[in-house]
Image (spheres, rainbow, N blue to C red):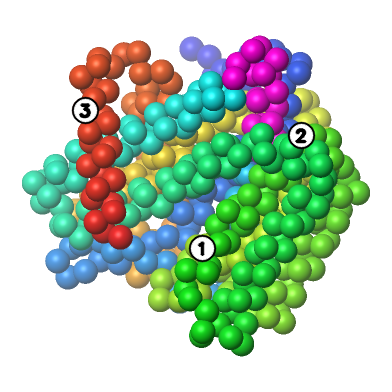
């Protein structure tokens, strides 16, 4: 029997040899990094409290440990996520058109690939919502679980909306160049001025929603410009240093909330909808990504052992995105039922001891996610193994979960 390390090296060499020379390894590496930041961020900055009846409730260490806010600056990598998405979409649309595929056909194909895993996870959770209470799981725990599952799914809706705008983004990018991204920053700054300025009390709350499109479109538009070769190293340096300077000014002078994710009990948040601070961080991250592209590409070409996990993460992207919260719950729910209060798992996240314990639990969450993914990866590809009745049941289950989630909201 081959030694595990020998087998790992062999697998890495095989994957490396099968990778086309034209493959942009740097983009795949950036995508993998942004994807992994999602579960790590949710697992590290999200916790539970255990009520007297044994139910789990959402909590965050950021409520008591504000000094952890800089961790969210590193783990909130949506700027890079949308940067790579915009670049990939432009190139994908170009290849599709070269093959005679219409925009509608291209968009339909990308939509189906993104929605299949969503239908899978929501259909399974529709079943769990009915099954778990019968197994003695408290109703509040079920509602907590459903809330956590929904959290990452709305990004897929945003991503689909941005994907649909790809031809428009490309046309505007060709016409306006970098100004196409600069105008988005201006729009978000204007809305922030309205909702945070001295007249904020007289401004309706729905004004903040105007930031949703330009706020998340900013990184995507940078990706479009990158694919059009309109975002070179000089512009990347402007993004890096300009974004960093704006980030510091917004924090220190205008007192924006330090956390890049929502904190329970804190009314003002940066991400829902995105504030100007989110765009400043995205600019910094995207500038760094563009500047590091060539170096990262060379590293992943020379080191097959580094390239192997990048390939695995990219192939499992939707599984990681849609099921990572379920993996944490698969540990926490039995833990609460069998062990009660467990440090770092079901105790109040209000100390650095909790943080240390949670860090030690991250490999366990990862292992459970791998186990879940072994069974759920069939949702990612074409549902050829499912009968028509099975697909109809999945769609019905997904609709029931959506109704349940909307009821909670």
Residue at image coords 14%, 66%: 53
Location of residue 18 (image quadrant): top right
Residue 178 in the image: state x and y as whole percent.
82, 49
Specify start and end residues of the magenta stretch as a single range. 86-102
Query: In the rendered image, which residue does mark 3 sit on?
Result: 393
Q: Residues within 10 Å of mark 2 (few under 14, many from 20)?
A: some
Query: Mark 1 or mark 2: which comes first in sequence?
Result: 1
Relative to 310, 265 lies left or right: left
Q: CA distance from mark 1 to mark 3?
A: 34 Å
Q: CA distance from mark 1 to mark 2?
A: 29 Å
Query: Mark 1 or mark 3: which comes first in sequence?
Result: 1
Circle 1 or circle 3, nearest the eye: 1
Image marks 1 and 2: residues in contact by CB distance under 8 Å:
no
Query: In the rendered image, which residue does mark 2 sit on?
Result: 227
Q: Is residue 106 above or below residue 359?
A: above
Residue at image coords 52%, 39%: 160
Q: How many marks?
A: 3
Query: In the rendered image, which residue does mark 1 sit on?
Result: 209
Q: CA distance from mark 3 to mark 2?
A: 40 Å
Q: Is residue 18 above or below residue 238?
A: above
């Amino acid at each position: 029997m081959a030694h595990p390390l020998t087998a790992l090296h062999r697998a890495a060499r095989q994957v490396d040899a099968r990778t086309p020379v034209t493959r942009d390894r740097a983009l795949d590496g950036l995508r993998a990094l942004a994807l992994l930041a999602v579960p790590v961020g949710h697992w590290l900055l999200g916790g539970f409290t255990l009520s007297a009846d044994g139910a789990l409730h959402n909590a965050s260490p950021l409520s008591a440990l504000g000094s952890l806010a800089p961790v969210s600056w590193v783990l909130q990598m949506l700027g890079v996520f949308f940067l790579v998405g915009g670049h990939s979409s432009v190139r994908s649309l170009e290849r599709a058109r070269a093959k005679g595929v219409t925009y509608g056909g291209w968009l339909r194909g990308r939509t189906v690939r993104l929605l299949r895993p969503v239908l899978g996870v929501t259909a399974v959770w529709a079943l769990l919502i009915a099954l778990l209470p019968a197994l003695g799981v408290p109703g509040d725990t079920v509602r907590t679980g459903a809330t956590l599952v929904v959290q990452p799914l709305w990004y897929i809706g945003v991503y689909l909306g941005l994907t649909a705008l790809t031809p428009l983004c490309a046309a505007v990018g060709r016409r306006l160049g970098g100004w196409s991204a600069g105008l988005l920053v201006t729009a978000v700054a204007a809305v922030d001025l309205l909702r945070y300025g001295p007249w904020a009390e007289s401004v309706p709350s729905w004004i903040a929603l105007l930031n949703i499109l330009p706020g998340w479109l900013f990184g995507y538009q940078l990706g479009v410009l990158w694919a059009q070769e309109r975002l070179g190293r000089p512009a990347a340096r402007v993004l890096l240093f300009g974004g960093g300077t704006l980030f510091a000014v917004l924090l220190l002078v205008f007192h924006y909330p330090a956390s890049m994710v929502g904190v329970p009990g804190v009314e003002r948040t940066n991400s829902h909808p995105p504030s100007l601070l989110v765009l400043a961080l995205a600019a910094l991250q995207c500038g760094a990504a563009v500047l590091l592209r060539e170096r990262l590409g060379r590293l992943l070409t020379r080191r097959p052992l580094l390239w192997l996990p990048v390939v695995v993460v990219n192939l499992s992207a939707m599984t990681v995105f849609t099921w990572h919260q379920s993996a944490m719950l698969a540990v926490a729910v039995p833990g609460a039922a069998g062990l009660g209060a467990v440090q770092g798992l079901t105790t109040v996240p209000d100390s650095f001891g909790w943080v240390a314990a949670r860090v030690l639990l991250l490999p366990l969450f990862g292992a459970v996610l791998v186990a879940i993914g072994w069974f759920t990866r069939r949702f990612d590809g074409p549902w050829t193994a499912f009968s028509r009745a099975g697909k109809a049941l999945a769609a019905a289950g997904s609709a029931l979960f959506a109704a349940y989630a909307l009821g909670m909201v």
